[in-house]
Image (tube, helix red, strand yellow):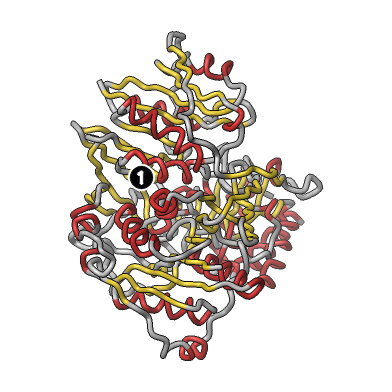
Amino acid sequence: MEIIVCVKRVPNLSETEIEVDRDGLSLVDSDLEYDVNEWDNFAIEAAVQLKEAQGARVTAITIGDEDSEDVLRRALAMGADDALHLMDSAFDGSDALGIATALHRAIADRSYDLVLTGAISSDEARGHVGGMLAAMLDIPMVALATDLSVDRTTATVRHEVEGGLERVTRVNLPALVTVQTGLNEPRYVSIRGIRKVSGMEIPVKTATDLGLDASTVGAGAARVKLEEMFLPPRGEGAEMLEGDEASVIEALVERLQREGGL
Amino acid sequence: MHKVLVVVERVKGEPDETAFELLAAAQGMGDVDVSAVLMGEGISGMAEELTRWFENVHVYDHPSLAEPDGDYQARVLASLVEGERPFATLIPHTNTGMELAPMLAVRANAPLIADAISIEAEGQEIRAVRTMFSGKVQARVAASADNGAIVSLRPGAFTASATLPEAGGAVHSQNITDGIAPRRQYLETVSPDPSAVDISQAEVLVAVGRGIDDEENLELVHSLAEAMGAEVACTRPVVDKKWLEKTRQVGTSGVTVKPRVYLALGISGSFQHLGGIKGDPFIAAVNIDPAAPIFAVANVGIVGDILELIPLLEEKVRERRG
C-alpha cells in the first residue's frame, strides 16, 4: 500500500507575542519558532502505524522554503520511507487552491492508495486544502478522522460530526482522509532520530518540474486575496486582576463567590 | 439584486440554527434574493417550513442523502450552482461543511473563503474577515464573485434576525444528476457513554487546558473543583492526550455547557472551545500568556502560572467555605 502524507511547517504561537509586519500581510517573524503543524503530526503517526501493522510505503510531501525540510526530516525520523519537497518562489503567496493545485500535480501521477492531511493548519486555519485536493484527484474524502483502519481495498474512518458525536464511514481506496488531533499518540522524535535520517536524500521539485504553469499557483493566481492582517479588536476584554499572588487570588475568590461560583 | 444560496444543515429533524445565521449574513450583504438548499430524506415538511424565511427552497429529497456526506453533497450541488449561478453560496463551517465547501469550490470553479466571521459585498467583490494563528490574528480577505464565490461561515459568528418571518417562498424540487452517487458508506453513529459524567447541566465548571502541562497536575484541578463544589471540564488537547474523558470536553466538537460560572485555567480560548460555552456565564481566566484570546471574552483575568496559583486558590476557597 502507498500512503502519502501532506505536512506543513507552521509557527508555534501558543505562548508568543504576535506582531503584524508593517506591510500588514505577514507576521514579524524574528522571535517565532516553527514546528510541524500539530494535525499533520497525527497524520504522519497514523501512516507510520499503518505501515508497521500491515506494511505500506509512506511518502511525506511539503510545500515551502528551505526551512521546511525540517518537517520532512522529522517525518522520515518517525518512519516515513520517502519525502518530497516542493520548493519554488512561484508557490509563494498561494491560497488554499494554489497549494492544492501543486499537491495535486505532485501526487496525481504517482501510485497511491491513501492520502492523509491534517484536518486544518494552525497558521491559516482554513481546513480546506484536503477537500480541494480530493476533488482534484476525484477521490472520496472524509474529514476530521479520530480513528482509521485500512484493508486492501477500503478505509474505515471514525470521524467527528456536530454535537460531540462521531460517525463511522467506509470508503473504497484510493481515498483522502483529513486527520483530527487525538487520533493516536505521535511518537517522540529525538535529535538522534533526526540525525539518523540526515543523510537521506530528499528530492526537490519546482513548479516547472511538476509541469505546472506558474500562473496557476502563487500570489498572482490566488483567488482569495489577503488584504490586511491585524490584531483582533480587544473589545471590553477582561478586567485584569493585578498585584502580588495573595491579593490576586483573594480578589478572584471574592469575584467567584459573588457570582455564585463557590 | 444578488442571488445568494444558503446551505441548510439538519440536526435531529430540524434545520440547524446556522441556517438562520447564514440567512442574516446574506441579508447583511445588501440587495439580495436568498434561497435555501436542503438535502436529506423525508424533508418536504421542513422545506415547506423554510419558505417562511427563504424566497426559494431547493430540495433534494432522496434516501441517498439521509446521512450527511460532504463528499456526495458537493457533487450533488455542483449542477445547482452551475444552473443558478449565485453571486455567493454560503455554507456553515461545520464538520460536514468542511467537506462540502472545498469539494464544491473545485467542482464549481469558484473561489472559497474559509471560516468567515463577517462578510460584505462590494460591487462584484466579496470581503470577509477571518481568524488565523489560533485566533491571535484576524485577516481581511477578498474574492471576486464574477464566477460566484463560496464562503464558509463560522457557526455562532452571525446573529439570526429576531424579526418574525413571513410566508411566501416557493419550494423547488431538484433531482440528483444522473451518474452522481454516494462514494461513502455510512456504518454507524457512535454516541458518548450514557453513564459518563454529564457536564452540560453543571452550574459551576473548573475547566483546564493545555497549560496543565502534565497528567499528574490534574490532581490539583480535581482538588480545586471539589473545594468549589464544581465539575471538572477541559479543552480538546487534554482529551487528545487521554488525560480526561471526551465527555468532559467543552466545545463545538465536544459538549455544550451553560454554567453560571466558568473558571478557565490554562485555556487559550480557541473559538472551537468557546463555541461550546453558552448562556453568557461569568468567566474567570488564568493564563500565562497575556495575549491569550480567552482574555477578550473573560470577565476577569489573571496572567500567571496556573500550577502555582491553583493550590493557593484552593486554599483560599476552603478558607471561605469554612
**Quadrant housing residue A31:** bottom left
Give residue B41's position: percent from left, percent from top: 60, 26
Q: Nearer the viewer, residue B250 or A219?
A: A219
Residue drawn at point x = 58 percent, y = 21 percent? B43
**Quadrant housing residue A229:** bottom left
Above or below, A196 against A105 in this view is below
Q: Indicate the quadrant containing the C terminus of chain B: top left, top right, bottom left or bottom right.
A: bottom right
Give residue A39's position: percent from left, percent from top: 50, 63
Question: Is residue B239 visible in the rendered structure shown here?
Answer: no
Q: Indicate the quadrant containing the N terminus of chain B: top left, top right, bottom left or bottom right.
A: top left
Total numbered badges shown on the rendered structure:
1
**Secondary element type, mark 1:** helix
Give residue B203's position: percent from left, percent from top: 68, 43
In the image, B198: left or right of A14?
right
Q: Nearer the viewer, residue B92 or B254?
A: B92
Q: Which residue is mark 1?
A: B106
Q: Amino acid at mark 1?
A: Val
Residue drawn at point x = 63 percent, y = 48 percent? A169
Residue drawn at point x = 43 percent, y = 60 percent? A122
Above or below, B49 against B77 in this view is above
Above or below, B161 against A214 in this view is above
Question: Is residue B174 visible in the rendered structure shown here?
Answer: yes
